[in-house]
Image (spheres, helix red, strand yellow):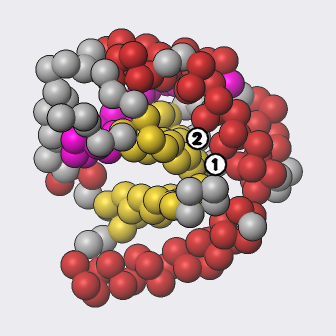
Amino acid sequence: ILETRDLLMNDLEEEIKLQLHKIAQLDIKEIYADWNLDMKTGMIIAVLENEDAKDDIAWPEKINKEAFHDKVNLASKRAQKTPESTESFFLNERTILIRRQGIFVEIEKELIKGGFIEELKLVKRPLERGLLEKVNLEEDLNQQIQEMFFDWNFNTDKGYTVVLLAPAEN
């Protein structure tokens, strides 16, 4: 099912870009998507052509962004290697977007060259999810993680992770 959804998203990518341009005048460079079949949820990320147009939302003071990045990089190192760069964006009180670049090791690059992209995605998602759970990001976030979503651009050696936090308790 996940493989079929990935293939469907690949087929729909240009149509999604076109519709976002028609509706909101957004010029989209890339589309990323992931699904959680158990929770019947998913995410779609649209990366704008002009990435400089973003307004960064300040991270809450209770979160140590540097410690958070250290743990993300540690999990990445355990899965493949330490990213060449890690950026994160606090999109709202419950959503964090992580972009890592320079993450693939040589065996992954060879699998990509060999056309094993879909197989690589299907293996990397649970691996990265499990490793991020092991480094205990919740400790640095001071909030429980509800879901995580993953997708990669295998041609440009980058990956995106969306961390969806559980609603804060009053």
Would you identify the image quadrant in which residue 98 lies? top left
Q: Nearer the viewer, residue 41 or 107?
A: 41
Callouts 1 and 2 close, C-beta under 8 Å: yes
**In which quadrant of the rendered view does residue 134 lie?**
top right
Q: Residue sitting at 14 percent across and 20 percent down?
A: 61
Q: CA distance from mark 1 to mark 2?
A: 5 Å
Residue at x-position 69% and y-position 39% = 126
Question: Can residue 81 be seen from the camera position used here?
Answer: no
Q: Amino acid at mark 1?
A: Phe
The residue closer to the viewer here, 117 or 8, is 8
One can see residue 18 in this view: yes
The residue closer to the viewer here, 42 or 11, is: 42
Q: Is residue 150 left or right of residue 22?
A: right
Tell me residue 119's x, y (percent): 81, 51
90 drawn magenta: yes
Q: Considering the numbered disc 2 on the image, is that residue within a helix, a strand or a loop?
A: loop
Q: What is the secondary structure assignment of the residue under circle 1?
A: loop
Q: Residue at x 26, y 72 (%)?
A: 26
Residue 53 percent coordinates (x, y): 17, 54
Q: Is residue 48 above or below residue 60?
A: below
Mark 1: few/some/many CA within 10 Å (<14, 14-19, 20+) = some
Q: Which mark is residue 142?
A: none
Q: What x and y, as percent, mark residue 4?
A: 73, 71
Residue highlighted by disc 1: 154
Q: Position of residue 41 (x, y in %)?
A: 51, 61
Q: Determine if the magenta segment contains residue 169.
A: no
Quarter of the figure that contains the N terminus: bottom right
Residue hosting label 2: 157
Q: Which residues are magenta?
A: 79-99
